[in-house]
Image: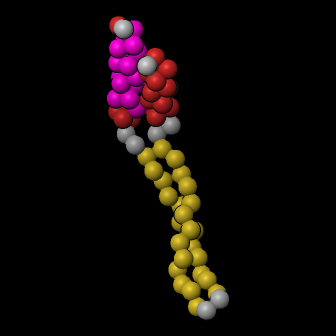
Amino acid sequence: MRILGILVLTIGFLLIIFNGFDFQEEKQVARIGPVEINRKEDRHIDWPIWTGGIVVLAGIGLLIAARKK
């Protein structure tokens, strides 16, 4: 339980530090016989900072629960 708490706490801090990530998605626009036309689209996924705060609090809660056993 203690290791899980440390892991959740670390993930929470990473969510606070890195508030999103970018990636490229390739979509097929048209296909005419053996010829394909594709388009690359830049995408961004982000999350609010308070999400990381909630995960940090959950990690602290797990550490406290592991300590009481």
x%, y% of residue 68? 35, 7
Q: Where's residue 43, x and y in %? A: 50, 58
Residue at 48% from the left image edge and 30% from the top image edge = 11
Q: In this view, does 50 lie to the left or right of 30?
A: left
* Total marks in image: 0
Which residue is depicted at the point 37% across and 39% down?
Answer: 48
Farthest-out residue, top: 68
Q: Judge whether residue 57 is colored magenta.
A: yes
| In-front residue for pair 1/25 | 1
Furthest residue toward front: 69
Quadrant in the picture for the C terminus: top left
Left or right of 56 in this view: 26: right
21 or 55: nearer the viewer: 55
Regarding residue 13, the answer to whether it shows in the image is no
From the image, give the main secondary structure of the stretch colored magenta: helix
Q: Considering only vertical position in the picture, is 40 above or below 64?
A: below
Quadrant holding the N terminus: top left
* Left or right: 61 as drawn, with respect to 16: left
Asked if residue 60 is among those painted magenta in the image, a careful observer would answer yes
Q: Which of 64 and 47 is in front in this view?
A: 64
Residue 35: percent from left, percent from top: 64, 87
**Direction from residue 31 to residue 49 in the image, left or right:** left
- Give the residues in magenta: 52-67
Q: Which residue lies furthest to the bottom in this view?
A: 33
The answer to whether residue 67 of the structure is visible from this angle is yes
Vertical placement of 43 versus 4: above or below?
below
Q: Where is residue 24 in the image (x, y as percent from the top left)?
A: 56, 60
Decide which of 64, 36 is in the foreground and name it.
64
Q: Which residue is drawn at 59% across and 76% down?
A: 38
